[in-house]
Image: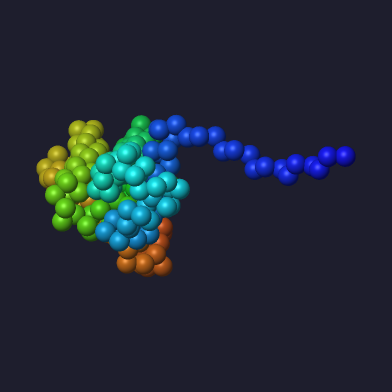
Amino acid sequence: MGTAKPDLPERQPRMHGEQRRALILEQAKTLIARQGFAEASIGELARASGVTEPVLYKHFGSKKQLYQTLLSAVEAQFMERFEALVSRRAQQDLLDSLANLLLDYRAAAMADHEGAHVLLRAGLESNDPQTAKLNQAHIKKIYGLVRDLLAKAQTEGLLPKHLDLTAATWGYLSLLFALQYRGQMQMFDQYTEKTIREVNRLWLQGLRSG
């Protein structure tokens, strides 16, 4: 009677290039969100993805290129979520959209906590010219979205005709940035959903009566 052969572990299917690239980006997002770009070494990034450093370089060329690719992807995904939330409200009620802009921004960020931390860290680590350029482009997109919303409300007579749209837009962005940095400052207990809603309400009330 022959000896039974030991069960061998199933061989994992080999990943295609795009699958491997996506996995590297996902693991890099987790590591960079936790440690920051400067602190995350190329070795750590490779190990987190289960690849060697040469394989990581093959896909991205350099640590910086990996970071820039990740930033672009995370930023695009965030804007897609934020724009969808804003657009959905605006189609139903433009004032409701303006009254809930901060909460929609928070919802878009909370849908991907790690991505939100990567974007926040990019703002803090923007002494690199290319990172600063990506960060500026991100802010311009948010500015454009908010300004278009305010301009439409003004055209429809929901906001005063004399309202300075540039000032009103930057006011909203200041509130959005305060919301973004509350996570960095660990001020969740002081800046609750109720407080966020009230801040947004007071700002819109001021714009409408201004």
Q: Eyeballing the image, is 31 above or below 146? A: below
Q: Quadrant of residue 149?
A: top left
Q: Residue at x 37, y 42 (%)?
A: 55
Q: Quadrant of residue 33?
A: bottom left
Return the residue nearer the eye: 142 or 154. Answer: 142
Return the residue nearer the eye: 182 or 52. Answer: 52
Q: Residue at x 27, y 41 (%)?
A: 61
Q: Eyeballing the image, is 156 above or below 48? A: above
Q: Quadrant of residue 73?
A: top left
Q: Position of residue 119 (x, y in %)?
A: 29, 51
Q: Position of residue 196 (x, y in %)?
A: 35, 57
Q: Is residue 146 left or right of residue 56?
A: left
Q: Residue at x 50, y 34 (%)?
A: 14
Q: Position of residue 194 (x, y in %)?
A: 41, 59
Q: Is residue 206 visible?
A: no
Q: Is residue 54 left or right of residue 140?
A: right
Q: How is the image coloured?
A: rainbow
Quarter occupied by the N terminus: top right
Q: How many marks?
A: 0
Q: Position of residue 126 (x, y in %)?
A: 19, 54
Q: Residue at x 26, y 59 (%)?
A: 38
Return the residue nearer the eye: 159 or 172. Answer: 172
Return the residue nearer the eye: 95 or 30. Answer: 30
The residue most toward the front is 1
Q: Is residue 3 visible?
A: yes
Q: Eyeballing the image, is 60 above or below 106? A: above
